[in-house]
Every structure is written in C-alpha cells, then in structure tokens.
Image (cartoon, helix red, strand yellow):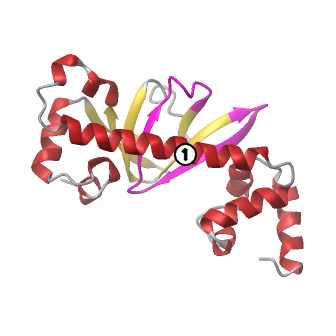
C-alpha cells in the first residue's frame, strides 16, 4: 500500500490491515486528473480523499474570479461535505492522482458491521472539523477590507517566508487572499520598503 495512504490523517492511528479492511467496506477509487481540470462530478456529496500526487484546490467563483479557499498538496487529506458548500468545487492545479472515498457509504446501516468503522468515522469527523475551522480562518481573511490586513492574516498562519517561496505564485496568493494581483504586488513592495516583511 502507498506510504502516503498509510501516513495520512484520514487513516491516522490505523494499521495497514485495518486500512485495507476499511477500503473494502466503502466505495473508493484512485482518480487521475489533468492540470486545470475542474472536478465537477467529484465536488458533490460528502467526499474524503488523499492527494497522492499533484495539487488540488478548493475554489469559489465570485463574479468570474477564482478564489482559492484551500490548497491540498501531495499527502494532504480532506473531508468535505459539498452539500453545505454548494458554491465550491475542486480543480486540479497540476496533473494529480487522488484516492477518493465516498464517505456517505460508511454512515449506511449495512456498514455497521465494519469493525473499523468507529475509528475511521472519528478521523473523518476530525478532518471535517479542521476543514470548518480552516474555512473560518479564510472568512476572516475575506472580511478584511485592506490588503495589508489580509497579508498579515496570511503571515500569522504561514510566516513571512511563505510570501516569497516558489510554492505559491503571486497569482495564486492573490486568489488565496481574494484580492487583485497588481494591488497585492504593490502592497508587498510597500511592506518590504517599510521593513515589515
């Protein structure tokens, strides 16, 4: 079994045999997505997964503008109920491979006999709660009227170095902060001159 799956948050605290048993209890598949592919079919219902390769973004479209709610890189796990996030969907930002689990199946009555169900459900709920907490953080960013305030929120969580790492392009950072890219560049230059970053 892939090392990424074994060490994922989704299967935290579970042995390989237990993980194999869980995967036999619920619908799962490994899907490949090409760069810039919108995962419309995947972005419905209660889904969980692990990014085995590439990068998948959770997005909102606002007035024909993409806003990045969350970035999932290789080895990241997610648990998302798209029924309560109907205006959001996922897109592959690189060629990607994802282990996809249809979480709704584990809650069905006929799955109660799955002995690993309680531990797995606990991990799903922890991941789901973390997702809600993260979206609350993002709402805090979106609510800030000034770009500098948005940048400072980002720095609080990820540090100053992440602003200039090659992991996130300036365009993606602007989408993540829900602001205009040229305005973001101007503000970053100003903050640099002032010795703040």
Residue displayed at 28% across by 24% down: 107
Q: Is residue 28 left or right of residue 167?
A: left
Give how far across and how far down residue 189 sits, in percent.
86, 72
Residue displayed at 62% across by 44% down: 136
Residue displayed at 44% across by 40% down: 128
Q: Quadrant of residue 183?
A: bottom right
Residue 105 colored in magenta in the image: no
Residue displayed at 79% across by 31% down: 63
Q: Is residue 124 above or below residue 104?
A: below
Q: Is residue 153 left or right of residue 46?
A: right
Residue 84 colored in magenta in the image: yes
Give how far across and how far down residue 109 sits, in percent.
21, 17
Give how far across and how far down residue 86 sits, in percent.
58, 24
| Observer able to see residue 93 | no
Q: Quadrant of the C terminus?
A: bottom right
Q: Is residue 121 left or right of residue 33?
A: left
| Observer able to see residue 130 | yes
Q: Is residue 67 left or right of residue 115?
A: right
Q: Nearer the viewer, residue 81 or 165?
A: 81
Secondary structure beneath disc 1? helix
Range of magenta residues: 61-88
Q: Which residue is the extreme one toward the top?
A: 109
Give how far across and how far down residue 24 sits, in percent.
15, 34
Tally the numbered discs. 1
Q: Is residue 86 above or below residue 144?
A: above
- Residue matched to label 1: 133
Name the chief secondary structure element in magenta.
strand
Specify few, some or many for label 1: CA neighbours under 10 Å numbering under 14, 14-19, or 20 or more.
few
């Amino acid at each position: 079994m892939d090392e990424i799956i074994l060490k994922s948050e989704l299967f935290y605290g579970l042995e390989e045999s237990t993980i194999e048993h869980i995967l036999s209890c619920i619908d799962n598949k490994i899907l490949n997505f090409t760069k810039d592919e919108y995962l419309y079919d995947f972005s419905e219902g209660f889904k969980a997964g692990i990014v085995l390769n590439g990068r998948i973004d959770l997005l909102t479209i606002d007035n024909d503008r993409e806003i990045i709610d969350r970035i999932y890189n290789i080895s990241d796990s997610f648990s998302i109920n798209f029924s309560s996030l109907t205006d959001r969907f996922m897109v592959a930002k690189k060629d990607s491979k994802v282990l996809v689990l249809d979480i709704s199946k584990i809650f069905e009555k006929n799955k109660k006999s799955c002995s690993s169900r309680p531990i797995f459900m606990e991990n799903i709920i922890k991941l789901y709660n973390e997702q809600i907490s993260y979206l609350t953080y993002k709402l805090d960013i979106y609510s800030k009227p000034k770009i500098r305030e948005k940048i400072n929120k980002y720095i609080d969580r990820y540090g100053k170095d992440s602003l200039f790492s090659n992991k996130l392009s300036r365009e993606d950072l602007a989408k993540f902060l829900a602001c205009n890219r040229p305005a973001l560049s101007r503000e970053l230059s100003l903050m640099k001159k002032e010795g703040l970053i």
